[in-house]
Image: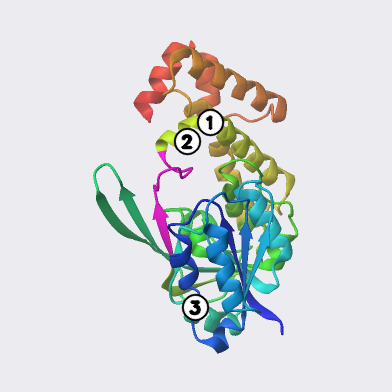
Amino acid sequence: MKKLLSIVIPVYNVEAYIKKCLDSLIIAPELMDKMDVLIVNDGTPDRSAEISREYVKRFPGVFRQIDKENGGHGSVWNLGLKEAEGKYTRFLDSDDWLENLDMLLEKLETCDADLVLTHTICHVYKVKQDEHLDWRLEIKDMDFGRMYDANAFDWLNNLDHSGVLLHHCCTYKTEVLRQYLPLFLEKQPYDDNILKPAAIIGSGSLVAYDFALYHYLMYREGQSISANVQNKNIEAKIKSQKYLIEFVERHRLPEDSSKYLYFRHRLPNLYNYGYKSFVGFPYKEAKAYTVNWDKWVRSHNPSIKTEWTKLYHLLPFWMYRILVKIKS
């Protein structure tokens, strides 16, 4: 039986969360039969894989598990995308969970869009303040249920806000992403940043539905989005940013398409990252990172000129650094 939806789940040190994640995928048996739940054990040292293996035993033909050596989040998603059996693929981190999965499967039965968008519920937990904050990441500026031509869609004004093109809101036609394998950087954080340009460039059509599907647990200790982890992983962030730029520039788009207009507008901002992001570091470190970024930009794309590249070359670094802090 051809599967309708593959759900790829990385497992590493999530013993406290994995059961809630997998329980959220248990729905009516006739709907579960349409699912391919691919759990990838990334060499976890805790009991996460042991717990997830019980679901494989309980639901054979739906849940399956691959055990491999640790290669990082991106290696799991590359493998999952390669092995996915569904027409569509959804990525689900194992500390997150889903709801309304039955509604998604119902929509996918009659849908042929390359990119399917749904709302996300974000759960922010700050351990030190013992504070919980929930908010809804919503799809806006679209007619729900309407199929859009991705080459004519106004990407810049309709969806370029609030993170709605991150994987939490997106279900992808498997073949759209699989053509780019290996898509994700491995053995480093920020591997999922590539999904936004890959989805825009690869999709021929898109549709949005008016229900929440994904529950995203944010700022859990050790997550790559937390500020302290981002500072520690600055080299990985730089590598990820360069990969984004190279990916976009490698896939040339027709100049009369809305996708081309979108990336023509966004690409300078990708380059600006390295001219603005290091000023918070101590002076010598900030200068060294910025100098190295500028060397890469000039060797990679000497023609790029933005407000910040011009100011960087015009001002002494101490003055430039102050200006960036003021404007930021």
User: Which of pointers 3 and 1 lies earlier in the amino acid sequence?
Assistant: 3
Identify the residue position indicated by label 2 in the image. 230
Contact, mark 2 vs mark 3 (Cβ under 8 Å)? no
Residue 103 coordinates in the image, percent (x, y): 48, 81
Vertical comparison of 127 with 166: above or below: above
Q: Is residue 38 above or below residue 47?
A: below
Q: Is residue 185 part of the magenta span, yes or no? A: no
Of 70 and 74, nearer the camera is: 70
Q: Locate the N terminus by quadrant.
A: bottom right
When asked about the image quadrant of residue 149, the answer is bottom right
Q: Which residues are magenta?
A: 214-226
Q: Which residue in the protein does label 3 denote?
A: 26
Mark 2 → mark 3, Cα distance in angstroms: 34 Å
Q: Amino acid at mark 3?
A: Ile
Task: Give the camera-side residue of 201 and 123.
Answer: 123
Q: Magenta segment: does it hold 223?
A: yes
**Can you give x and y, in whole percent of width and height, for residue 37 in the image?**
60, 71
The structure's colour scheme is rainbow
Residue 135 in sight in this render: yes
Tell me: 53 left or right of 119.
right
Question: Residue 234 got which mark?
Answer: 1
Which residue ends up furthest to the bottom in the rendered image? Answer: 30
Which residue appears at 57% of the width and 82% of the height?
32
* Amino acid at pointer 1: Ile
The residue sitting at 47% across, 60% down in the picture is: 158
Helix, strand or loop under label 2: helix
Is residue 241 positioned above or below 58 on the image? above
Q: Is the C terminus in the top left, top right, bottom left or bottom right quadrant?
A: top left
Marks 1 and 2 in Cβ contact (< 8 Å): yes
